[in-house]
């Protein structure tokens, strides 16, 4: 492993794309699902992470679904973007980063100011119509109010009504909207996947951040990028299969990586701009 600072010349060349996983948000108080203390220790992913499992539970045991929704959004709403999310947004503003491809559903990239984001697994603040593919986003305040209301509902009927009302109906066809979350076994949203590949087609450097690289089909993307000749930088405190294709393995947390790299990039970026400015004058 070489020193992180040695990456600066490569990063300054730009055309960077970030491929992110749950580890990036673990420093935003959102535990990874499979990690220690993660949701899957308590909730069986075969039921709670599959559309079929959740739908049948919703019909036969809505209280269990309510408890899961409340716990999930309590965790999500208590977190906020961290230094690494803001760092990625800053790289985009500096025109060094083409886009972020994320497997996370927590919306932290947008909340940190990134505008080029491909959300491969959806977004927990969005709902969509499976027929028209219209996507509607609700804000944090709306979710906070919904979760508070849901906590107070006790009867089966009240719980079902509260959840269905909040999801709303499609503005196009009036069918019931569904959570815009890609469950296990579902295909990825085509528009987002296309956007992700369009970033990778121009990428010279791929930053893989906080991803185990074992959740497919998303995990194919770094291999695609590698075949196209991009340099791969894998940032993860643990070893993962992506180490095998990485040109650089950085055994650091996402936040530590950005705390080292960003001040140096900022310094060289502003020095460069100052020089250019002087030349113009
Ligand atoms: P994952 O497969 O994305 O793996 C998480 C990886 O992050 C691990 O390799 C771990 O070593 C690494 N990691 C942990 N802390 C880190 C840190 N501080 N900095 C950098 N890397 C760190 O995780 P998963 O939880 O099994 O997720 C599976 C899928 O579930 C994800 O792809 C995502 O779709 C979804 N998920 C989303 C969120 C979220 O939106 N925040 C959270 C959990 C899971
Ligand atoms: Zn519709």
Image: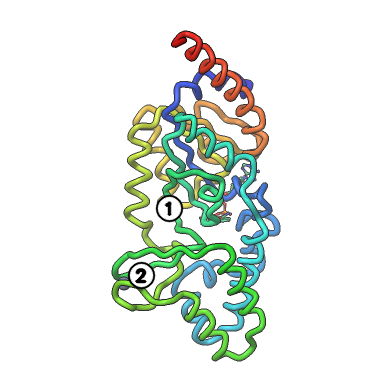
- Which residue lies at the image location 54% right of the left edge and 35% below the top edge? 90
Residue holding disc 2: 129
Quadrant of residue 235 in the image? top right
Q: Position of residue 260 (x, y in %)?
A: 66, 28
Q: Position of residue 56 (x, y in %)?
A: 48, 81
Q: Residues within 10 Å of mark 2 (few under 14, many from 20)?
A: many
- The mark closer to the camera, 2 or 1, is 2
Quadrant of residue 148 in the image? bottom right
Residue 131, compared with residue 82, is above or below; it is below
- Which residue lies at the image location 34% right of the left edge and 72% below the top edge? 171
2 and 1 marks in contact (CB < 8 Å): no
In terms of depth relative to the viewer, which is nearer, 45 or 260? 260
Q: Mark number for residue 77?
A: none
Residue 279, compared with residue 2, is above or below; it is above
Q: Position of residue 34 (x, y in %)?
A: 61, 56
Q: Does any atom of ligand 2 lie closer than 8 Å to the CB of label 2?
A: yes
Q: Does any atom of ligand 1 lie closer than 8 Å to the CB of label 1?
A: yes
Q: Secondary structure at mark 1?
A: loop
In terms of depth relative to the viewer, which is nearer, 111 or 104? 111
């Amino acid at each position: 492993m070489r020193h992180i600072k040695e990456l600066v010349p490569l990063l300054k060349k730009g055309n960077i794309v970030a491929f992110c996983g749950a580890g990036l948000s673990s420093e935003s108080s959102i535990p990874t699902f499979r990690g220690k203390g993660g949701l899957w220790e308590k909730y069986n992913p075969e039921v709670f992470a599959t559309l079929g499992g959740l739908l049948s539970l919703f019909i036969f045991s809505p209280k269990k679904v309510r408890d899961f929704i409340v716990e999930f959004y309590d965790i999500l709403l208590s977190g906020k973007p961290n230094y690494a999310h803001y760092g990625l947004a800053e790289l985009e503003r500096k025109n060094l980063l083409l886009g972020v491809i994320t497997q996370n559903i927590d919306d932290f990239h947008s909340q940190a100011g990134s505008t080029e984001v491909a959300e491969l697994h959806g977004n927990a603040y969005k709902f969509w119509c499976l027929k028209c593919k219209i996507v509607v986003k609700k804000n944090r305040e709306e979710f906070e109010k919904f979760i508070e209301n849901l906590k107070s509902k006790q009867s089966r009927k009240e719980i079902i009504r509260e959840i269905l009302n909040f999801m709303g109906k499609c503005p196009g066809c009036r069918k019931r909207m569904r959570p815009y979350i890609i469950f296990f076994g579902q295909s990825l949203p085509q528009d987002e996947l296309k956007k992700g590949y369009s970033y990778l087609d121009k990428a010279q450097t791929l930053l893989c951040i906080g991803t185990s690289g074992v959740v497919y089909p998303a995990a194919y993307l770094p291999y695609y990028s590698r075949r196209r000749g991009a340099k791969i930088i894998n940032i993860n405190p643990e070893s993962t299969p992506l180490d095998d294709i990485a040109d650089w393995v950085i055994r650091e947390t996402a936040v530590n990586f950005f705390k080292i790299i960003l001040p140096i990039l900022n310094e060289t970026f502003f020095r460069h701009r100052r020089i250019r400015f002087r030349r113009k004058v």
